[in-house]
Image (cartoon, rainbow, N blue to C red):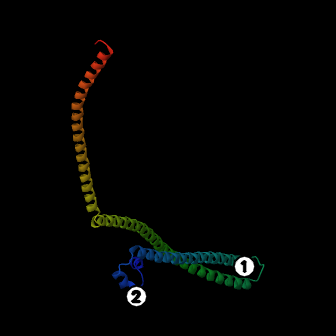
Amino acid sequence: MNILNRLFKIGQSEAHAAVNQLEDPIKMTEQGLRDLRQDLDKSLHGLAEVKAMAIRARNEGETARAKAADYESKAVQLLQRAHRGEMEASEADRLASEALLKKAENEGQAGRAAGDQEKFEQAAAQMDQNVQTLKATISQWENELKTLKARVTVSTATININKQLAQLDSSGTVALLERMKEKIAVQEALAESYGEIAQTSKSIDSEIDKALGSTGSGKAAADLKALKTKLGIAE
């Protein structure tokens, strides 16, 4: 069995097209595993049949050996009866000979059955070894398929992320951010400028109010003194 051929089998007529079109390796591996599982089912069925044949041969051999022993026992009994005078010696010899022929026939059957049993057991052992190898191969490829699927998932996600990052610069997003930064910087500078102007205006108003406040205080003091004189209030 060529496992590699089965693992990458899409169809004989489409083999070259599959290579040229770079068929999905996951699907190819899954198809190969399905083929292997079918082979395993067939192998298990065949192994069961061979083991059944070995068991049947063993049972036939045991039956034949039992019959051979029984015929030998009957031949002995016939000779003993003739010896005791319970039956004619010639008749006893004839029947004992027939019993011994049956014994030999069953011994031959037992020998053939033993040979068949050994042959079937050897075939079953070889088939069982192949089945175990096939099971190990399936398990190995199932694990590799899981790894392959995981790698495909990671690579697909990486491709998508890298693609998004590539499109981020090509779409002008970075340039847009730079323009926004520049605009904000201009607005911040303008706000600071207005703040300085407002502060300057406030300082001038303070100076004016201060100057006017001094003059007003002198006049208010004079008016207060005149009012007290009018009322006759001494200082």
* Residue to which mark 2 is pinned: 13
Question: Residue 112 is drawn in which quadrant?
Answer: bottom right
Query: Depth check: 88 or 191 in front?
Result: 191
Displayed quadrant of residue 221: top left
**17 and 122: which one is in front?**
17
Task: Identify the residue at horizontal 68%, vertical 84% (top origin).
Answer: 98
Residue 141 versus residue 121: which sits nearer the camera? 141
**Could you tell me the amino acid type at mark 2?**
Ser
- Image quadrant holding the C terminus, namely top left
Query: Which residue is identified by label 1?
Result: 78
Please say if the residues under marks 2 and 1 sit with CB atoms less than 8 Å apart.
no
- Picture coordinates of residue 126, whole percent (x, y): 47, 74
Label 2 secondary element: helix
Q: Nearer the viewer, residue 150 or 209?
A: 209
Classify 10 Å Cα crowding around label 1: few (below 14), some (14-19), many (20 and above): many
- Compared across the picture, whether 3 is left or right of 170 comes to right
Query: How would you rate the neighbour count of disc 2 (Cα within 10 Å): few for under 14, some for 14-19, many for 20 or more?
Result: few
Check the image and report above or below for 162 versus 181: below
Please state the horizontal and vertical placement of residue 51, each as a whole percent of the image.
56, 75
The residue depicted at 25 percent of the width and 59 percent of the height is 179
Q: Position of residue 123 (x, y in %)?
A: 50, 77
Q: Is residue 1 left or right of residue 63?
A: left
In terms of image quadrants, where is residue 144? Answer: bottom left
Q: Is residue 81 left or right of residue 26?
A: right
Q: Residue at x 24, y 50 (%)?
A: 190
The residue mark sitting in front, 2 or 1, is: 2
Classify mark 1: helix, strand or loop: helix
* Residue shown at the point (56%, 75%) measured from the top left: 48
- Tell me the amino acid under the disc marked 1: Leu
**Quarter of the rendering occupied by the N terminus:** bottom left
